[in-house]
Image (spheres, rainbow, N blue to C red):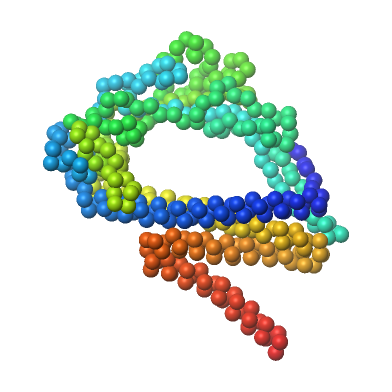
Amino acid sequence: MSIMLHSNGSGVVGRFVASVVGLLMVLGAGWLLFWNEGRAVKTQQALEEGRDAVVSLLTVEKVLESNEGCLVHARGTARTGESVREPLFGFSVPCLRMVRQVEYYQWVERKEKRHTQQGDGSAKMQTHYHYTQRWVDRPVNSRMFRETHHRNTVALDLPSESCWGAKCVHLGAFRLNAGQVSRAGEVAELSAAQVQLPPEWAARGVWSGNSFYVGSHGPADADNPQIGDVRITWSAAPQQALVTLVAQQSGHTFVPYVAKSGYTVDLLRNGQYSAAEMFEHAMQQNQILCWVLRGVGVVLMLVGMCMALLVLRGLVGWIPLLGGLLEGGVILVGLAVGVLVSLCVMASAWFFYRPLLAAGLIFFGVIPVYYLISRRRRNSLTSLG
């Protein structure tokens, strides 16, 4: 653990920098909220259009020319007779698709900041730096660490996850494209017996369970990992899997269906589902993603707004009484303004798609502000009386 002290002067500079960063966060959050509302609406429109236009195939064993260019609902068994080759480690497994997951044993820095108000009205901030070793899904850049002796290395620098599919996968008389193959079948971890590593790779690591460990400084020890060690796990889907898809029929294959909104419909789930179930699930996923992005956008807006207002706190923070009162006031104002701006941004986006809902958002956003202004006026009149 390392402790760093900041003086009042550096605190003012820090608040100014935080204000600039906060303003950038506000702009980014506004863009995210606006884009997300448009994305959600266009996706919903595309799914509604597809739900009304979809044609369910009675069989996938025959290609009907009458369905050419139509959005079709097909279900059956996706099959391949091929093996998928792992391009780096040089082994092959008979499967629909293979997934490689990589983890790294790294130093991780965590900052903890504490503000202390001094007797003379100045502020002092302490930053505590904590360092832990753990498995992470990507290498950590230790050059930015406060403590320079915590250095990260990696035995192998690979993407955290990679996927490869069989080149020829059939669904009856049809053939799935690469994007559809990448989603077909439920993957399960491969054991050491299923992964036949070439001698040069087998000599560089050890197996523990279903994971292959590669050491950064000599042989790896799964029970006592060292900084830079890499842990690799492979998973694969069997050569046959029940799938259901909704896409546009194009010859003997399927392509994404482009809706009037400009968004595409290309659905695939493992298992057998009706067309109604496929669209209902896709709409639910769209709503979940919409609310997740809304939450992220609102949080960024609130944090950014509070940070942007910190410069005001820095300008008057040297006044003992006013500085203390404004410390909480800035946060409250930032939260209130952040909520209002978030609602207005979402409402402005909805004006292009759902005017009635947009008006409702603005209405409920203005009510709290109107209530606060009215209450303040009543309090002012009461104090004067």
Give residue 130's position: percent from left, percent from top. 70, 39
Q: Could you tell me residue 308's position as x and y percent?
A: 65, 57
355 shown above or below 141: below
Q: Residue furthest right?
A: 120
Rendered view: 84 above or below 29: above
Tell me where residue 108 sits by quadrant.
Answer: top right
Please say whether residue 84 is visible from this viewpoint. yes
Residue at figure coordinates x 59%, y 64% from the top left: 337
- What residue do we see at 28% from left, 54% from top? 48
Above or below, comparing residue 297 to residue 73 in the picture: below
Which quadrant of the structure image shows residue 41? bottom left
Q: Is residue 140 left or right of residue 206?
A: right
The foreground one among 149 and 144 is 144
Q: Position of residue 183 (x, y in %)?
A: 34, 35
Apparent side of residue 278 relative to residue 121 in the rendered image (left or right)? left
Quadrant (top left, top right, bottom left, bottom right) of the C terminus = bottom right
